[in-house]
């Protein structure tokens, strides 16, 4: 029986403390062997990206945000800082990264120390409660909003950080396009996705936060390609992965990855990129 065949479950109820605790349980150790053997190596050529776009996404960000040397840029939910560091290396921009997970923020600071081009500063904080007197040319957030319950506060932070009407906020996000409650609960339990919303609701939330101009683009091909590579790697590298994390954990990765693939291929989930301006 798959998740899609199971009976609906109750709606998710989680406090901010529950969300932070789940984030720590899931993402404190993104340097484990399974991440390297099934994700970083086969999908991203060794780059420590925790998103589904990889270098294609990096190129899109550089182009869309028109990043140049010394441009002040804000990364909301920067994780380990690897994507931000790549942007710094390519453009020489100056990025401020905000990350709620203390261990990931510490890794991001280590990543920043290794930069030879551009600058990366890290602040460990909850984006929904964070503010800065500095204004930024561009703001972006990659594969983070699904982990956030309070979208309005998160989007207000992004809007208030932009310098003038010319700035842009680019975000990638997984959207709910027909999931049942059991599936939504599974994605919360397995990946901390507390903020899965429908596209129409997402548009309204961006508008209410002050982003009157929005361009939405489906990036489902990125998601399917990423998950397909992970699927192949999980089987090709199953012996070392099983030795490292155990049979049950390997099987769980296989089953959840298959569930994501089914949801994207059937259209129940959408991987979207939005470019939003005031």
Image: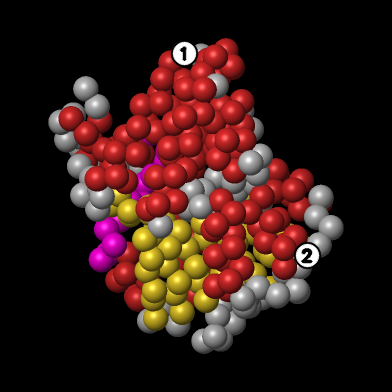
Which of these two is toward me, 44 or 153?
44
Helix, strand or loop for disc 1 = helix
Residue 154 pos. (x, y %)? 46, 63
Q: Is residue 73 left or right of residue 8?
A: right
For the magenta stretch, what is the residue range? 189-201
Kindly identify the residue that appears in the image at 26 percent across and 50 percent down.
Answer: 267
Residue 18 pos. (x, y %)? 42, 40
**158 drawn magenta:** no
Residue 148 visible here: no
The residue most toward the right is 116
Which of these two is toward me, 77 or 274?
274
Query: What residue is disc 1 on?
Result: 247
Residue 59 pos. (x, y %)? 59, 63
Residue 245 pos. (x, y %)? 54, 18
Q: Which mark is residue 62?
A: none
Depicted 64 relative to depicted 117: above or below: below
The residue most toward the bottom is 165
Residue 220 visible here: yes
Q: Which mark is residue 118?
A: 2
Q: Mark 1, residues whose alpha carbon is within 10 Å: few (<14), some, or many (≥20)?
A: few
Depicted 154 relative to depicted 195: above or below: below
Compute the Cα span from label 2 to label 1.
43 Å
Chain-order first, disc 2 or disc 1: 2
Kindly identify the residue that appears in the image at 55 percent across and 57 percent down.
Answer: 56
Kindly identify the residue that appears in the image at 35 percent across and 32 percent down.
Answer: 258
Q: Mark 2, residues whose alpha carbon is within 10 Å: few (<14), some, or many (≥20)?
A: many
Helix, strand or loop for disc 2 = loop
Which of these two is toward me, 11 or 225?
225
């Amino acid at each position: 029986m798959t998740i899609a065949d199971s009976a609906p479950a109750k709606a998710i109820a989680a406090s901010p403390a529950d969300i932070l605790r789940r984030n720590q349980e899931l993402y404190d150790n993104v340097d484990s062997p399974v991440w390297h053997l099934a994700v970083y190596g086969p999908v991203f050529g060794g780059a420590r990206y925790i998103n589904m776009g990889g270098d294609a996404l990096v190129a899109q960000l550089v182009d869309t945000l028109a990043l140049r040397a010394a441009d002040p840029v804000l990364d909301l939910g920067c994780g380990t800082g690897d994507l931000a560091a790549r942007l710094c290396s390519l453009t020489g921009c100056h990025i401020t990264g905000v990350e709620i997970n203390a261990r990931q923020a510490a890794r991001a600071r280590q990543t920043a120390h290794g930069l030879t081009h551009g600058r990366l500063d890290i602040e460990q904080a909850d984006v929904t409660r964070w503010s800065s007197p500095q204004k930024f040319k561009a703001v972006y957030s990659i594969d983070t909003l699904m982990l956030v319950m309070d979208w309005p506060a998160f989007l207000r932070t992004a809007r208030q950080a932009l310098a003038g009407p010319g700035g842009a906020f680019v975000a990638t996000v997984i959207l709910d396009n027909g999931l049942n409650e059991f599936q939504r609960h599974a994605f919360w339990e397995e990946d901390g996705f507390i903020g899965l919303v429908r596209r129409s609701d997402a548009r309204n939330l961006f508008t209410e936060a002050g982003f009157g101009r929005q361009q939405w683009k489906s990036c489902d091909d990125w998601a399917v390609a990423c998950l397909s590579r992970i699927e192949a790697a999980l089987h090709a590298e199953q012996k070392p992965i099983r030795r490292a994390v155990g049979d049950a954990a390997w099987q769980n990765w296989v089953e959840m990855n298959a569930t994501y693939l089914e949801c994207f291929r059937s259209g129940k989930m959408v991987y979207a990129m939005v470019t939003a301006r005031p």
